[in-house]
Image (tube, grey):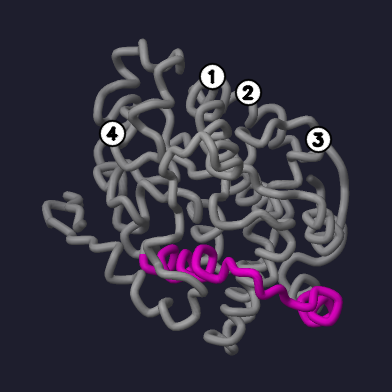
Amino acid sequence: MSAKVMIQEKVVMIDPSEHLRPEAAFAKKPLNAFRDYTIDLHDPIKERVRQTYTSMHTHMTVDFVKKQHKKWCGFNTFKSTVMDVIHRLDDLVDESDPDADVPNIMHSFQTAERIRQEHPDKEWFQLTGLVHDIGKVMAFYNEPQWAVVGDTFPVGCAWADSIVYRDSSFDLNPDGKNQIYNTKYGIYKPNCGLENVIMSWGHDEYLYRLLKHNNASLPEEAFYMIRFHSFYPWHSGGDYMHLCNQKDIKMLPWVLEFNKYDLYTKSEEYPDVEALTPYYKTLIDKFMPGILCW
């Protein structure tokens, strides 16, 4: 479905689906079998996913997100190298993901290796694939997974129709009673730019802010991929275009390019993490070296 956004009196046509076709060559199952959020109370994985999103959509308010910023964006929880955090994900299974029921470290290396095969000249892109989920380390510090994983969306304005479980999971969210938050623009202005939007809290926003704080030397395209890779209502649903500015539209194709590796590389073919670690350590040392503040 195409979406329109008015920017500087011009209509920009965006068709996210155009960017989601070339990946069929490496996907290990039919494309329409990914991101299956149908409700099945007898399927333990689907029910786990539904419950995670229900908790998220119940508690993810403007006030909660602001509290998370204060809690996590002082970056004083612990200190660690990036590679050590990546290996900690060997003990994390994402409870919001209907396509993977394995430790997150496998998904990180699957994503990075496919990007490496198709973009051998873009080291920053490969590294982005490897690290994009490491903000999930918050789950090891008493954060419930609903505040760490899953699709993201703006808070402070109306919830879009393309949000997962939109019709059944927001009933108990207190922001639903706020008249301003339930308007199209909410607390924002038309085409204000996504950098000025308060996103739901999760690993995307945390890692983006953490890497900025620690002076990672990635290009702007990488920071957009990291910050918005879970913002499916935007990059795949075509919603929230009315909040985008020219920069967002320019960066959208890069987010979509990343998305096909993030989503469609999930499979039961697992990379040799031990063998690949030395190569990716050289990239970490180049773009985000040393001990970081988390």
Q: Amino acid at mark 1?
A: Asp
219 relative to 106 in the view: left or right: left
Q: Are marks 1 and 2 in contact (CB under 8 Å)?
A: yes
Q: Which residues are magenta?
A: 253-280
> Which of the marked residues, 2 or 4, is nearer the chain's N terminus?
2
Q: Amino acid at mark 2?
A: Lys
Q: Residues within 10 Å of mark 1 (few under 14, many from 20)?
A: few
Q: Residues within 10 Å of mark 3 (few under 14, many from 20)?
A: few
For label 3, the residue is 141
Q: Which mark is residue 189?
A: 4
- Comparing labels 3 and 1, the label whose residue is closer to the camera: 3
Which element type, helix, strand or loop, lies under badge 4?
loop
Q: Residue furthest front?
A: 42
Q: Residues within 10 Å of mark 2 (few under 14, many from 20)?
A: few
Q: Which mark is residue 67?
A: 2
Nearer to us in this view, 125 or 194: 125
Spatial separation of the CA atoms under disc 2 and disc 4:
23 Å
> Which of the marked residues, 4 or 3, is nearer the chain's N terminus?
3
